[in-house]
Image (cartoon, grey):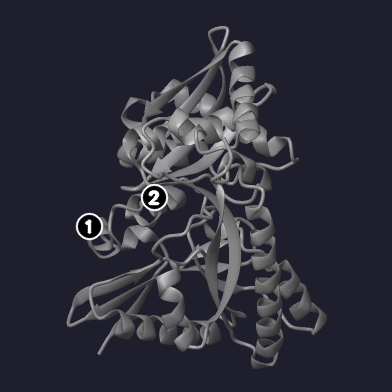
Amino acid sequence: MLDVKLHTAIDEIPCAQWNTLCGTAYPFLRHEFLAALERSGSVTPETGWQPLHLTLHEQGAMVGAMPLYLKSHSWGEYVFDWAWADAWHRHGLEYYPKLLTAIPFTPATGPRFGLSIDHDRGIAAIVDAVRQLCRRFDASGWHGLFVEPGVTPRLEAEGLMKRLGSQYHWFNRDYGSFDDFLATFSSRKRKNLRKEREKVARQGVTLRRVPGRDITAPMLQQFYRFYQTTYRKRGMKGYLTAEFFSLLCDTLPEHLLLILAEHDGETVAGALCLRSDDTLYGRYWGCQAEYDSLHFEACYYQGIEYCIEQGLARFDPGAQGEHKIQRGFEPIETWSCHWIEETGFRPAIADFLDREAHQIRAQMDALAQGLPFRKPDQA
């Protein structure tokens, strides 16, 4: 018999137990990352993220763990369901609160739970528990975002509906250098990319990559100003506090890479990435002034060079951005899974998801035609 417990703070769960179940290679599911979000005030009930982390127990031992949040809005998720909320509202129903299993503010595919028991048994217990929680909290449903593709069939078998999305990722095909990567481009596309990199150099901007253990407090303060500037340009405030980044540097330095851009002896831009054993994740960016093509250099090309040097298999630069295609980032599928509590809405949601998937696949096929890689008969 499995017992279910809820935790209103990640710190109620011992770090070692959580990481033993969930692993430590993928940075975003680590106890330290989730704790940094909560301890820094970035993820709290006041910001619309009420932690309700779920653990499974058997004979006194913790055998399962999953991040879970009670959400009062849909910000910071990157799988957009505003139209669903509007449909609920138009029918006189409340869409919020809803239950969410995701990494806050992080559209990066990866594991969403850890189990030391048979996965079919553990997933069945999790789904059953979440359905009961939907009724307990009067939630409209449960949403698992950016789940690993291999998990979706099991969740579908439990009655969840899957939703297709897409992103653009770079894949390392055993390149020995950035020039080896460029050699796979058609001649015109190769020249265009080189021109972008040359523009940055001609403006007198230089870049350097700083491993997490070498990131100093002044560097982090500068980066945070850049990060907030990115949001201010849109009339918003960044979701994450300065303390969050400081906690990351203190607790997960081995997962961090800071890319700094400098001009005339002054740091003018920065991009902060995280890495796993095989993947680089581009996460946060900002600059104090506009420099031609600097965003592409700092957020894409520096990351590609790093992956080649470190032997990483993949570079996930973040959500959205069709402009990544012409720079060698390939369209890939992403998945989310959804339990809809209101039975009357399930057929309509299922129909929407089916039509949306056809549209996304057609768009992915069309975008793939714009990839810069040369054909076999091209130079």
Looking at the image, is 137 positioned above or below residue 214? Answer: below
Residue at 23% across / 78% down in the picture? 117
Q: Earlier in the sequence, mark 2 or mark 1?
A: 1
Residue at 50% across / 63% down in the picture? 146
Q: Residue furthest bottom?
A: 344
Q: CA distance from mark 2 to mark 1?
A: 13 Å
Label at residue 16:
1
- 2 and 1 marks in contact (CB < 8 Å): no
Work out whether residue 88 or residue 356 is closer to the camera in this orientation and state it.
356
State the image coordinates of residue 301 (x, y, percent, origin top left): 52, 32
The quarter of the picture where the C terminus appears is: top right
Looking at the image, is 350 positioned above or below residue 65? Answer: below
Q: Amino acid at mark 1?
A: Ala
Q: Is residue 316 left or right of residue 356?
A: left
Work out whether residue 298 or residue 366 is closer to the camera in this orientation and state it.
366
Q: Say which residue label 2 marks.
A: 33
User: Helix or strand or loop: what does disc 2 sit on?
Assistant: helix
Q: Residue furthest right?
A: 90
Looking at the image, is 307 positioned above or below residue 353? Answer: above
Q: Is residue 143 visible?
A: no
